[in-house]
Amino acid sequence: MEPLGPKIISPKSPNPIPVKLYPHRFWCSNRCKSKKWSMPMHSCASDNVKLAESSKLQLNNRKDLIESIAKGFVGFAAAATALASICFDSPAFAESLTVAFPASRAPEVNTVQRTLVEAWGLIRETFVDPTFNHQDWDSKLQQTMVEIFPLKSADAAYSKISGMLSTLGDPFTRIISPKEYQSFRIGSDGNLQGVGLFISVEPRTGHLVVLSCVEDSPAARAGIHEGDELIEINGERLDGIDSEAAALKLRGRAGTPVTVKVHSGKDVGRESGTREVNIPRGYIKLSPISRTIIPHRTPDGHLTKTGYVKLSAFSQTAAADMANTIHELESEGAHSYILDLRNNPGGLVKAGLDVAQIWLDGDETFVNAVDREGHTLPINMVDGHAITHDPLVVLVNEGSASASEILAGALHDNGRAILVGHKTFGKGKIQSVTELHDGSALFVTVAKYLSPALHDIDQVGITPDVQCTTDMLSSPKESLLKNKSSVSSLEADSCIMVAEHELDVQESKGTAS
């Protein structure tokens, strides 16, 4: 009797039963081209394990992958409700192979078997670590197929695929079910009913942490803060659960409650410890831009206007909204700018590129992508036309992740902005998001990124030029506050005051960056 595991068969092997896979439909931003997979299903009436169904995987060339990254079709999965994707823009194939495997008699498990082979093949060709965390990836397929074969449910089979992916040692490479993927897509479009949390897996610990709360959301009103660790949702432990699965548990019909157990770290004005919070779900409006004019008096007594822009996520409309906002602030007399990326968990990196072109001219390098062979490819802007050349400060903190770090790095390394705040999150990996034939989705880390000055960010973060304290200010904080006729919460923000100080320094030097 043949073993239950799959066999990898060369194209010349005799008489495998073919199941052809064609290029996937990659769900992505509206600039991406769609390509649809089809998988003809062959009947298998026999329960003889010697009868094998086979899947022919025609796999993408790495050159096509890295070129598509350069075109900007790149996305990050840094947060549970603001995520994105990458499109493979070319159907060119480097090789084809056939994988034969014993067909489960349970139809739903058989479908997941095909999904396993499909996911395994994509990992084999695109995962950023060519050693697959120092293991035999072909053997992992055989082992996982053996584990899936006797199962009776799709959920159990999916958990085996997740287990296989976990051996790669990368929390961002994962599979989500069709239901979770549908929720993911809805969340990316900004139409949500839930609690208003951006969450992510902390790569060093594997814990689910809060990157940020949507302003005035149910979670924010319940006192949940960035940096809090999620431990349970409705009494269910979250050990080993990824951000999409946790986000799905948090979402639900507006008005229904969800109970969350969180652990709060030590922070100024907050007690540390574990607590349980009952949160009523609500409608969450993900508006990526908020703005205002901050009156500012320079050291020589001159009253100026600083345009303050907060970008909360890199959605499909972020760049257009940003351009409109800058035009409005220019017409209102802004002479300098503060771009606030604090607690921005990322999103569409293509949106980040478009936002960068609002602040930068020409074809400056936006980011560098490094593939698994170690090849570095600069991704440059395309004919950038800055709306303004006024002085710019960018605010960052521990909640600034992925696309936020890319944009901050681009503006800093190209000499356009000073960075103020705290060290960023440190997510420097690029994920592809591929819709599989059964409606599930595979997230694969396909590359890492470096800033334009070739600084590594992954698990390191970006250290700002100026830390967010008032110690270096020439005037004490109390004196600064006395100069403001009415002190709003924004004007009392110490990071804003440090940013205004840095803008004064830039103005005194006659620079525009």
Image (tube, helix red, strand yellow):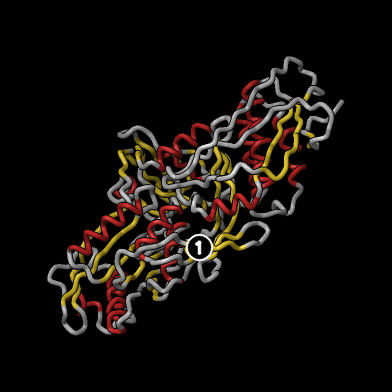
Quarter of the rendering containing residue 306? bottom left
Quarter that holds the N terminus: top right
- Give the residue displayed 51% in from the left and 58% down from the top: 427
Q: Secondary structure at mark 1?
A: strand
Q: Residues within 10 Å of mark 1 (few under 14, many from 20)?
A: many
- Give the residue displayed 41% in from the left and 59% down from the top: 272
Report whether 193 appears left or right of 98. left
Residue found farthest to the left:
485
Quarter of the rendering containing residue 269? bottom left
Report whether 10 appears left or right of 108. right
Quarter of the rendering containing residue 204? bottom right
Residue found farthest to the top:
45
- Give the residue displayed 41% in from the left and 43% down from the top: 188
Quarter that holds the C terminus: bottom left
Looking at the image, can residue 458 be seen?
no
Report whether 481 appears left or right of 158. left
Residue 315, x across and y down, in percent: 38, 49
- Give the residue displayed 36% in from the left and 42% down from the top: 190
Looking at the image, can residue 18 be seen?
yes
User: Which residue is label 1 attached to?
Assistant: 367
Residue 44, x across and y down, in percent: 72, 18
What is the three-letter code of the residue carrying label 1?
A: Val
Comparing 193 with 317, the one in front is 317
